[in-house]
Amino acid sequence: MEVAAITHDIACPLCRKKYGNTNGKYQEQEGAPLVREFLADTGMTAEQIDRVAYLVGHHHSPAQIDGIDYQILIEADYIVNASESGYGRQAIRTFMEHTMKTAAGVRLTKAVFGV
C-alpha cells in the first residue's frame, strides 16, 4: 500500500512530456510499466510488484476496485486531487456517497472539505 501510494503518480512527468497533460488514462497506461522497472531491483516479490503495478495502472478507475488497498488509494488520491484542483462541494459529496467505502476516508473528506 505504501509503495503504491508513493509511486502512483510516477508517470506524470512522462505524460506531460509525451502527451502535454497528466490525463488519468495516460497515467494508468504509462505508470504500470514504469513502476515495474522502478521496483525491479528492490527486493520486493514478483507478487508485490504485480499488485503495485496493478494499483498504479488503475488508480483513476474506481469502478474496478478489487481490494481494500485499491479502495484506500482511490479515496486518498481523490482527496488530494479535489483539494489541489478545487473540486466543487457537490462533486465531492457525490464521490463520497457513491465511491468512498472506508470510514476514515469519509471522516477525512468531511473534515477537509466541510461537507
Image (spheres, grey):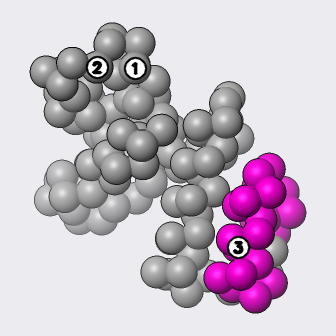
Amino acid found under the numbered disc labelled 3: Thr
The numbered mark at residue 109 is 3
Q: CA distance from mark 1 to mark 3?
A: 29 Å
62 versus 44 height, above or below? below
Circle 2 sits on which residue?
44
Q: Residues within 10 Å of mark 2 (few under 14, many from 20)?
A: few
Q: CA distance from mark 1 to mark 2?
A: 6 Å
100 versus 112 height, above or below? above
In the drawing, does residue 91 fall left or right of residue 79?
A: right
Q: Residue at x 42, y 48 (%)?
A: 5
Point out the tag, 3 or 2, that comes first from the N-terminus.
2
In the drawing, does residue 101 fall left or right of residue 62?
A: right
> Residue 68 or 95: which is nearer the viewer?
68
Query: Would you identify the image quadrant in which residue 70 lies?
Result: top right
The spot of residue 104 in percent (x, y) is 72, 59
Circle 1 sits on which residue?
48
Can you see residue 92? no
Query: Would you identify the image quadrant in which residue 24 lies?
Result: bottom left
Q: Residue at x 27, y 57 (%)?
A: 12
Q: Mark 3 and 2 residues: CB-CB less than 8 Å, in contact?
A: no
Q: Mark 1 and 2 residues: CB-CB less than 8 Å, in contact?
A: yes
Write the start and end of the magenta stretch as one range. Answer: 94-115
Point out the tag, 1 or 3, that comes first from the N-terminus.
1
Could you say whether the residue bearing mark 3 is in a helix, strand or loop? Answer: helix
In the drawing, does residue 82 fall left or right of residue 37?
A: right
